[in-house]
Image (cartoon, coloured by chain):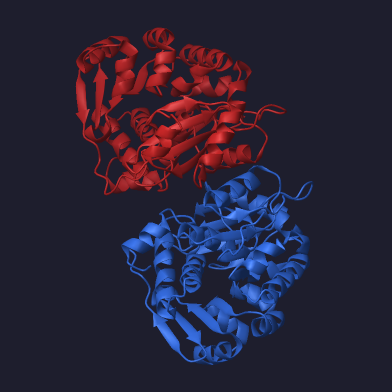
Chain colours: A red, B blue
Amino acid sequence: MSKANLDLVGIGNAIVDVLSKTDDAFLSSNKIHKGTMTLIEAEQAEALYAKMGPGMEVSGGSVANSIAAFASMSGSAGYIGKLANDQLGQVFRHDIKAYGVEFDTPSLEDGPPTARCLILITPDAQRTMCTFLGACVWIAPSDLNEEMIKNAKVTYLEGYLYDRPRAKQTFRKACEISHAGGKKVALSLSDPFCVERHRDEFLDLVKSDVDILFANEDEISSLYKTSTFDEAIHYTREACEISVITRSAKGSLIITKDETIEVPAEAVAQVVDTTGAGDMYAAGFLYGLTRSKSMAECGRIGSIAAAEVIAHVGARPQTNLKQLLQEKKAV
Amino acid sequence: MSKANLDLVGIGNAIVDVLSKTDDAFLSSNKIHKGTMTLIEAEQAEALYAKMGPGMEVSGGSVANSIAAFASMSGSAGYIGKLANDQLGQVFRHDIKAYGVEFDTPSLEDGPPTARCLILITPDAQRTMCTFLGACVWIAPSDLNEEMIKNAKVTYLEGYLYDRPRAKQTFRKACEISHAGGKKVALSLSDPFCVERHRDEFLDLVKSDVDILFANEDEISSLYKTSTFDEAIHYTREACEISVITRSAKGSLIITKDETIEVPAEAVAQVVDTTGAGDMYAAGFLYGLTRSKSMAECGRIGSIAAAEVIAHVGARPQTNLKQLLQEKKAV
C-alpha cells in the first residue's frame, strides 16, 4: 500500500506534547533538570501533571516533528511509531496524516495509553521535558513497513528509541533494511542523558550504521567524552559521512570527510519556545539533502525551519514551510 | 465543600477546542458560514476533522474561557459543566483547576465523549466554529452546586446552553438560585445564529432574569430584530441593568439606565486569532465589576484581556493576566 520511493521515513516515539509555561522555581522544587528529557512512569506523570499549569496539547515526538515539517516543505514522507487506540492517539494520527505523511502503524490494543511528554517552558524560552512512553514501548520489528523503508532515500531514527529493548531491536532492523536497499540512515542523538545511558552502543551504531548524524554540542561531547569540542569534531568526522552539530544561536556546523561548514542561525524577532528547534533543523537539512542541495544550502533550510518553530509555542510548524522556503529563496 | 462567597460562577458547555489554520476555500467547500458557530453531530465532526489540517488542542468553552481568565486576574471563581470520563475530559478538568477555579461537576459515565469544538482560523484571524456537544448535553439541574451559586456575586451563563432542553432547565434553575441569594446573573448571547434559534425565550430571559448582558453587534441586532443599531441600544437599555456590546476593533459600548460609555479597543501588534476575544472581554469586565470599578474601568480591563488573547492562537490567556493588568495600571 505504501507509495514507492518516499524521500524520507521516520521511526520514533509517537508522543502527544502537553506544553505549559512555568518558572525555574517549579523545576527546582520538582527536581527536574532544565533543558533535558527525563523518562517518567505513569504515576509520576499524573502527579506532575496535577501540579502543572494549564496546558496545550500538540502532537510531538522528535522524529515525528521532523517528518511533519519535512512534509510541510513538500517532501514525501512516511512515519512509523506506536500509539494506543485512545483520544490522544487519534489526535496524533490525525495530525501526522493531515501533513500528508504516510502512517499506517497499527495502534496498540489493551496496553498503556498513548505516550505524552509534559513540556515545561521557562521564561528564557528553554524547554524541559518529562516523558511517559506509554504505548511507544510496544513498538516491535513487526511494525516496520519494510517496503517503505527499503525504498526511501533516507530512514531517520531518534536516539530516544534506544531507551527500551523492543524499540532498540526495531531500530537495528530498520537500519538493516535501509542499507540492504542501498539507502541512507540518519540518526538524532536526541539528548545528552540519552547518550549517557547508551554511550557504548551509540558509538558502535554511529560508526557502523549511521550515515548522517544530528547532535547538539552537549550530545556530541557526551558521546565522545572529549574535553574539547574540536576533538569531538575529529571523532565524528571519522565515524560518519555527514555530521551536523546544532549550536542554538551560534548556528550550526556541518562536518564531512573533507570540510567543515559553518552555517549562521536565522534571525528571530522573539524566541518564545525552543521546543522542536533541533527537529525542525533536521527536517530542513534532510529536505535539502534529498533534493541534492549543497551542504551550506541544506544547513540554511534547516536554520529557516528552526527559526519558524522557536517563534511560537509548540514543536510543529504553524506556517506552510514550502511557502516560507520559497519566500526566503532557499529552494 | 465549596468556598463561600466566590466572586464569579460560570455555567457553560465544557469543551476542548481543536484549533487549525485553514483558508476561505476550505470553509466554502465545506459549506461552513464564516465567523459563526455551527452545531454538528458526531459523524459530521469526524468527517470534518478528517479533512482539517493539523490541530492544537486547548481547553475551551465560552464561559469556561472567561472563568479561566477571571481566575488568572486573581478573581475567585467556580465552574459548572459536563465532561465525559475520557482523555479530553481529563485535559479540560486539569486545565480549569490549574487556573485555580473550583470545579467539581461529576463526569458523565457511559455516555458520549467530551465535547469538542473544531475551530478553523482563516488568514484574516477570524475563527469559525463547528461544535460537537457530546457529554455537555447531559448537564442537568442536579449538577448545579447550589451553595456555590447562591453565594457568588455573579453567576455567568452562556446562550449556547439553550441549545439543549436539559441544559436549558439547568440554566433557568441557576438564575433562580442566584436571584434567591440576592445576587446578579450575567449572560452572553454567544452567537447570532444561537440568538435566532431562541429569540423569543432570550427576549423573555433578558428582560426578567438577566442583570448584565454581553453581546456583539450582530447578536444584539439579531435579538431585537431592529433595522438600526441605535434602536437595539434603546431596547437593551430598557431590559437590563447593564448591557455591554463588543465591537471588535471599534471597542465596546457599555449601556446603563443613565448613560452610554464608549470604550476604545486596546492596540494589538498583530491579530492572529480572534477566538475567545468576547470571552476575555467578559472576564475582564466582570472582574472590574466584582471589584466595584467604574463602568469605564471595567470596559478597559475587558479590552486589555481581549487584546492579549487575539495576539496568539487559542482562546485562553497565555500571559498571567493579573500581572498584565498591573503593568497596564488597570487595577
Answer left or right for A331 relative to B39. left
- Where is residue B114 drawn, in percent x and y? 68, 50
Q: Quadrant of residue A289?
A: top left
Q: Is residue A185 visible?
A: no
A238 sits left or right of B200 in the view? left
Q: Quadrant of the C terminus of chain B?
A: bottom left
Q: Position of residue A324 (x, y in %)?
A: 34, 47
Taking the view exactly as shown, the residue that stands out farthest to the right is B110
For the N terminus of chain B, the image quarter is bottom right
Residue A165 is situated, as x and y percent measured from the top left of the image, at 56, 13
- Decide: is A305 above or below A150: below
Relative to B254, does residue A10 appear above or below in the rendering? above
The image shows residue B278, relative to residue A8, as above or below, that is below
Q: Position of residue B40 (x, y in %)?
A: 68, 60
Q: Nearer the viewer, residue A328 or A281?
A: A281
Nearer to the camera, A222 or B286: B286
Number of callouts: 0
> B99 or B199, which lies in front?
B99
Q: Residue at x 52, y 66 (%)?
A: B279
